[in-house]
Image: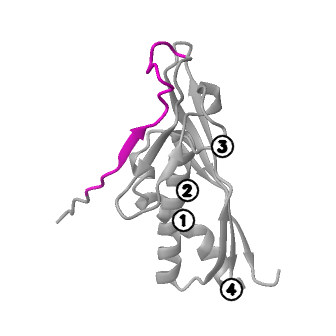
Amino acid sequence: MSKKHNYTAVIKWIGNKGNGTTDYKSYERSHSISVKNKTTIMASSDPAFRGDKEKHNPEDLFLSSLASCHMLWYLHFCATAGVVVLDYVDEATGIMEEEVGGKGKFTLVTLNPKIVVADLSMKEKAIKLHHKANEYCFIANSCNFSILHKPVITVLGE
């Protein structure tokens, strides 16, 4: 039996400089992202689209969601398979292609996790579990582009 999970977020535009959207340059792209009982995220658009470079943008958050979801599934599968992960850092990258008319989409994401495991005997399984994590990741399953995985696994003390 399948389960449905519902999510709610409140996105509030806070970039009205007094004249609303009278033209493309008349307003800021600043907005807040609020989820009940969680820290509010101050966001904007990418600087390429007149956004604030010091705030998260939808593309940053999308890439982060994908990498975070993968990591959480990966850690789960490692824990249940007896692979002891001691450290996990992913420097994920994404490519979004914009068309001439302004439409665009992500075409590639590469996850580059650097993982430290407790013992050499865990290394091979630690590599294989990335494939399983990708199969289960809710965000990855919602994407229609390639997601590459380039894990680097080291053993504590190497």
Label 4: how many residues lie within 10 Å, few (<14), some (14-19) or many (20+)?
some
- Span colored in magenta: 6-24
Residue drawn at (53%, 43%) of the image: 43
User: In whole angstroms, how far apart are the C-alphas of marks 2 and 4?
Assistant: 22 Å
Callout 2 amino acid: Ala
Looking at the rendered image, the disc whose residue lies closer to the viewer, 2 or 4, is 2
From the image, tell me which residue sits under label 2: 67
Looking at the rendered image, the disc whose residue lies closer to the viewer, 4 or 3, is 3
State whether residue 74 is above or below residue 9. Answer: below
Labels 4 & 3 near each other (Cβ < 8 A): no
Callout 3 amino acid: Glu
Labels 1 & 2 near each other (Cβ < 8 A): yes
From the image, tell me which residue sits under label 4: 118
Q: Quadrant of the N terminus?
A: bottom left
From the image, tell me which residue sits under label 1: 71
- Choose the circle earlier in sequence order: 4 or 3: 3
Residue 81, percent from left and from top: 50, 82
User: In whole angstroms, how far apart are the C-alphas of marks 1 and 3?
Assistant: 25 Å
State whether residue 130 is above or below residue 14. Answer: below
From the image, tell me which residue sits under label 3: 54
Labels 1 & 3 near each other (Cβ < 8 A): no
